[in-house]
Amino acid sequence: MEEKIHTILARAQEALAQSSSSEEIEEIRVRFLGRKGELTQILRGLGELSPEKRGAIGKRANEIKAKIETAIESKIESLRHSKFIRLIDEEWIDVSLNSPATTGGLARGHLHPISHIQYEIEDIFTSMGFTVLDGPEVETDYYNFEALNIPSYHPARDMQDTFWTEDGNLLRTHTSAIQVRGMETHRPPFKVIGPGRVFRYEAIDASHENTFYQVEGMMVDRNISVAHLIYFMKVLLREIFKKEVTIRLRPGYFPFVEPGFELDIHCLICGGKGCSVCKQSGWVELLPCGLVHPNVLRYGKIDPDEWSGFAFGLGLNRLVMMRYGINDIRHFLSGDIRFVSQF
Ligand code: DAH
């Protein structure tokens, strides 16, 4: 037993030195320190020794045990370290290397013009303290209609027919649903916008698509009036078109606003003189908006006697079409690379 104990440490160290994986190290641990391991057996056999030897060998065995444990720990540590070094070596990349895109091997993509204008609008509004919200494209009847003051019997539903799922949900017809969600997560005063994709059951032609994009906006505070609405809309349009635009408000009906408006801009193509884009009227209908209907605030658990607000729904496809002179809305989702690569 005594010879054995002298060689154990050296043998364990030797085995560790030659090991190169955590599995091997585990085997070594079991071989020497495990329940049936060499050292454990020695400790178990101590009882058969004379009392003097028992003390000396027991002490020695415990020292060796501690040394093997430390050796195992440091081997694990060094293995981890060298694995890391190897990773650095193997996964090293030269970030200064030219990419295929810059050397002409691969064409570099870019944002779709709709995404581009959406991000621009997000920047304009966040710079004025608005928060950008999101909402699901598959909505419930409650968020898309009911809480926007459009009960199931309301004829306004006919103007926004859409695709329904078998379990009674629908593809949202407008981003106004995000208003309702915004009122649930925000307490007044607040200013939010909600960009997104919307869907309608539509007879498709050059100006109608079943899938298009909007940005919703809503501001709720004390004593909000049409003047606030006009101010924010004018800033928005000035930033988008990079010049002052002349606007006018006409009455427009939407169940979730009262009063409701159609905001028109002086035609930017002809400067208001009359052309084919503005159908000779000098004005282009751009942006429905209004003061939030008290019922809508109530659905959002906001007291209409204390708070008021404005809301708007900006169609992004129309905006992009005006900006670039695009004459057919169907181009946007055509997937035609000749179209999108122009922007
Ligand atoms: N949700 C309406 C639509 O898609 C647009 C709209 C009108 C939004 C008036 C508004 C609003 O927030 O105040 O036809």
Image (cartoon, rainbow, N blue to C red):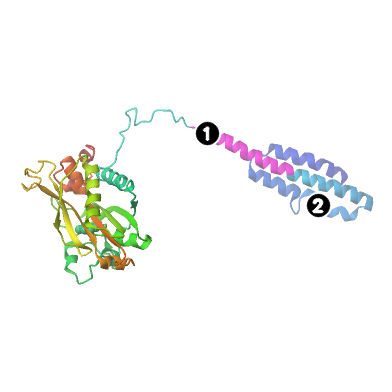
Q: Is residue 57 above or below residue 144?
A: above
**Quadrant assignment for ligand 1:** bottom left
Farthest residue in the front direction? Answer: 223
Report the side of 51 relative to 227 (left or right).
right
Density class for disc 1 (Cα within 10 Å; few <14, some 14-19, many ≥20) is few
> Which amino acid type is shown beneath numbered disc 1?
Glu
Q: How many marks?
A: 2
Q: Judging from the image, what secondary structure is the residue with disc 2 in? A: helix
Residue at 31% of width from left, 45% of height from top? Answer: 123
Q: From the image, tell me which residue sits under label 2.
A: 41
Q: Nearer the viewer, residue 169 or 293?
A: 293
Which sits earlier in the primary sequence, circle 2 or circle 1? 2
Looking at the figure, which quarter contains the C terminus? top left
Q: Nearer the viewer, residue 247 or 58?
A: 247
Q: Please identify, in this view, whether the residue under mark 2 or under mark 1 is nearer the observer.
A: 1
Which quadrant would residue 19 be assigned to in this image?
top right
- The residues tagged by marks 2 and 1 sit, at their Cα atoms, a distance apart of 44 Å
Q: Where residue 163 appears, x then y in whole percent?
A: 23, 62
Which quadrant would residue 312 be assigned to in this image?
bottom left
Residue at 79% of width from left, 39% of height from top? Answer: 10
Q: Main secondary structure of the magenta part?
A: helix
User: Is any part of residue 50 visible from this angle?
Assistant: no
> Which amino acid type is shown beneath numbered disc 2?
Gln
User: Is any part of residue 216 visible from this angle?
Assistant: yes
Q: Nearer the viewer, residue 26 or 317?
A: 317
Q: Where residue 136 appears, x then y in whole percent?
A: 32, 58
Residue 233 within the segment the image draws in magenta: no
Q: Where residue 252 appears, x then y in whole percent?
A: 15, 59
Q: From the image, tell me which residue sits under label 1.
A: 90
Residue 78 within the segment the image draws in magenta: yes
Density class for disc 2 (Cα within 10 Å; few <14, some 14-19, many ≥20) is some
- Magenta-colored span: 70-92
